[in-house]
Amino acid sequence: MKDSYEEYFLPLKDRKSQEQIFQKLMDICFDFYSGKSRDNKILIHKSPDELKAEIQEEIPSRGMGYDEIIDVLNNKVGKYSIAQFDKKNFSFPDSGNAVPAIMADIYSKFINQNMIAVSRSAPIGTFIEIQLIEWLRELIGYESKPLAQIGSLSEVSGMITSGGHMSNHIAIMSALNSTYPNIKNRGISSLDVQPAIILAGDISHYSFSSAMHHLGIGQDALLSAKINSDYTTDIKSVEELINNPPEGKKPFMVVCVAGNSRTTGIDNISELSKLCKKYGLWLHTDACHGGSLLFSSKYRKKFLTDIEQSDSVSLDPHKGLFSPYPCSFVMFKKRDTLAMFTRYEKEVRDGSAWDLGYITPFYGSRGFESLKLWLTIKAIGLDKLERIVNDRQDLARKISRLIDNSGYFTLFNEMDFYRMVFVYYPSDIRKKVSSLKLASSQKEKIKYWIDHYTHLINNQLYESGDLCLDEFKLIDEGNFTGLNIRDRYVVMSVTNGNPKQTFSNVEKNMQLLFDTCNYFKPEFMDKIEDILDNNGSNQKPSNQKTYGPAGW
Amino acid sequence: MKDSYEEYFLPLKDRKSQEQIFQKLMDICFDFYSGKSRDNKILIHKSPDELKAEIQEEIPSRGMGYDEIIDVLNNKVGKYSIAQFDKKNFSFPDSGNAVPAIMADIYSKFINQNMIAVSRSAPIGTFIEIQLIEWLRELIGYESKPLAQIGSLSEVSGMITSGGHMSNHIAIMSALNSTYPNIKNRGISSLDVQPAIILAGDISHYSFSSAMHHLGIGQDALLSAKINSDYTTDIKSVEELINNPPEGKKPFMVVCVAGNSRTTGIDNISELSKLCKKYGLWLHTDACHGGSLLFSSKYRKKFLTDIEQSDSVSLDPHKGLFSPYPCSFVMFKKRDTLAMFTRYEKEVRDGSAWDLGYITPFYGSRGFESLKLWLTIKAIGLDKLERIVNDRQDLARKISRLIDNSGYFTLFNEMDFYRMVFVYYPSDIRKKVSSLKLASSQKEKIKYWIDHYTHLINNQLYESGDLCLDEFKLIDEGNFTGLNIRDRYVVMSVTNGNPKQTFSNVEKNMQLLFDTCNYFKPEFMDKIEDILDNNGSNQKPSNQKTYGPAGW
């Protein structure tokens, strides 16, 4: 028996031992949640070299028993993983802690349906996914109908993807192919112009520039519009680019950002959709962050009016809808958009084929990732989902006031959605500096120390594992610092994504941030005074590099 | 409390009830495995309309309690799902039943790391994935080294993807950008030729033609080589296309198929790599099926010699390596291939950044899907993995003989890897027909009935839920039927992917196939006799459409 490998494959002969193995697994899953696996820290911080040393290993010849497997998961993997759902973690909204979503993901691993096809692959899964897509159409405000009336695959006009990155790729590709259908056979090399898209480069997600490369369009053809001081797209600037594109470039698409990944500022969708109608361009709304607001009639009205006028919309339930990765969608207003990408147009249109693989570009064999959102919506229901979104907005405003009232920070945005950005620049110091006439070299030096202490404070907290805020760089578009520097600042950022977060808990945890800020204030003031009085010393540009995903 | 939503998010207040919920979930997961959820059938078969009716529902306003959630998973989802791991299911190798892989997937849903970045996202996960990629490099035979010596992201030369479809896309994109680096900025529209790839269209995976469309190259530039009678690429035909491409098309890549998805025939990698070296073309080996043979020194030598000469290789552990979806990889010989796709070339090359998102085109925020293969290799170990692959090959040969010896079928291929294809055309009838001089209209009519009964028998078994073989269409390249018809036949196909499969079990299950074949034999003989004696009656072309994923 020592050479047997039977024990590694389900079903095990003995259901009792099978139950015990998974019982132990659930225990360490819960221990990660409770904090036990990670010494009650958000993260036990280690450097890249230390992490490499933890796991470096030749390919093992001999295997392990189940106790050892559990130990590896708990004491190697879990121990040095970060808990995004932890209530002391404010770096990103991706809480991923909805029980129905996790249950669905677990179940889907056991049933392991292949969503490429119906027959022999995913009989009920196919139709659950189509039902979900129809629900999402209804939530966006696209034309929708009962599942039984979906007569063919060509009517399925939306798809699940592995992430917003990919959803945005597929939106661009759809807009491009709608505009230039000959690309399918003849390729982009047959065009005598370079097709172009217009977006506000300073706030748009990097997936768009990546997609321009990957899809063969070329990054030169990403035309960047200006932004407003609230980190939304400057619509006049978009219209100027439409009217005066660089020579050889021809716009086919405009990107509307409904919740940028840095400040979650939301563009005016109505105005952008009117503009796109006027010029016959495809409007894509990147609602990877903002999409969760579709579940609240109040905030939908406030932030997402006319989203249903977009030709395509991307949504990321693994961000603002507490779903584990991967869970993203790209949705299309026009019913038969995805039929452009099929090999079997007849079968896709006549209703004789229901194999989703025929209309899911980039995806063939794939798992049943859509089950989790279908089950989350069914299990929690629209009423409670609306309350969750509304409560989150209420909490966001309270957090915003708490941070602002502390006096330690200069805010770059109001937290009117779920994310806010600020630098360590106490209001009393800012007021004093603003009242003085300073040379630009002095302002640059002040900025240096703002960057320095913003990072120092934030990074110290991050590495302690006791409080986690995001960190990245952002232009001070509204001149919030008063320093009039159009360079990127190192900023901290707070997000609330976990529906279990409470204000009293936020207050308690933010006290650690405030205490740390207070501790460094005398040092920081000395540096600023030195600049004001003696022009300070010259500093090399800071080179810190610890950005979370939003810095992307 | 009736409006609370706390109970839907982890961690629950009461760990005991949390444990009970997941205990009940595990019970229904195991019940799906044991067959209890699905009346001990591979599948409780329903039509598309019936499946739609099962789940059609307006977006629910009210949610559900946990007992109801469990009931939905068990009695809606599981009940009408197909069990790919079931030992009576021979349709596809995707058994997905490796316990360590399932454990890793479950654990990864709880820890929910975001593999886009190290900081605040996936600290240890990042390096586990890099370690795994290095192991895969070593298994392929690419240059490899210890993890600690990987000095920068630019050395990470391979990536996980959502499926072979995507892996093949990224391989083409890499080859294209290596050949035409200006595409990054200027796009394919700046080229004065249409870049082309060469592959054997009759056996290559459809992902390549899809990718030609999606990546803006154009499907016209997919140049199709001939195939040999063993369903491998005809290398002379490839060389002819290299030397005489259609006007305006310029080849940059050749695809080698290491296990096509229909017969798992494996191309001669050595010869194709020599050819590509001679002409300076990129060789991509699609080893989505064949890749599992890397774990066996015996079969690696027999089938995959010189695979390390390929510029890129795609691997699909969710096919031949019992891993749940999604789990696929694309690997590159040249270390810094993925650096072509980064926005931060300096950081990616100087070792200051370890954020995988910088070098994973198409993927930003994403889950820790690589954990499952890393843990599977660690848990089972190379020694046992080799035995599993070797045992599978032994079993494949035995199954092949069993099917052949039954006398009911005409085989289209030897099952020298893990998949075989055949039609219902009993050998005694075939011999009789072959001895006669027939008109081509008679041969066409015989083919009609071969198609008809192949489908009838296979579909009856499939819908019964008692035995599942694959079904698709395939050209009789070797004239195995003796009918000399270069049209596509409806074929059945048997695969063994489940490491727990045994020959005695196969014998028992195949008896049902043989019994069904025997039942229909008199009918079938009547049809054939009628054609031989009276030229039969005219039949409309059959129009059945129930193909599994391999038909793709």
Image (spheres, coloured by chain):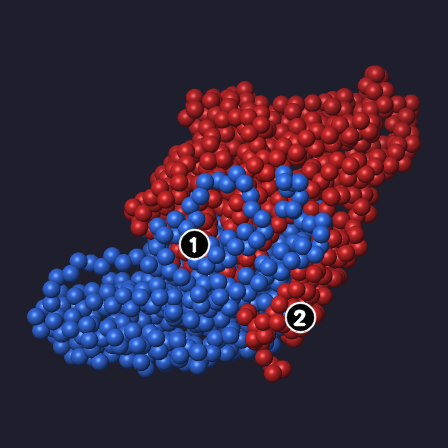
Chain colours: A blue, B red
Q: Is residue B269 left or right of residue B530?
A: left
Dividing the picture into quadrants, the one containing residue B384 is top right
Residue A364, position as x, y percentages in the image: 59, 46
* Subunit bearing disc 1: B
User: Three-letter amino acid code at disc 1?
Assistant: Ile
Reading the image, the residue beneath label 1 is B124
Residue B182, position as x, y percentages in the image: 35, 40
Residue B118, position as x, y percentages in the image: 39, 55
Vertical position of residue A354 compared to residue A431: above or below: above
Which of discs 2 and 1 lies nearer the camera? The answer is 1
Residue B546, position as x, y percentages in the image: 74, 44
* Quarter of the image where the N terminus of chain B is located: bottom right
User: Three-letter amino acid code at disc 2?
Assistant: Tyr
Reading the image, the residue beneath label 2 is B66
Q: Secondary structure at mark 1?
A: helix
Q: Rate crowding at label 2 as few (under 14), some (14 to 19) or many (20 or more) other CA atoms within 10 Å.
A: some
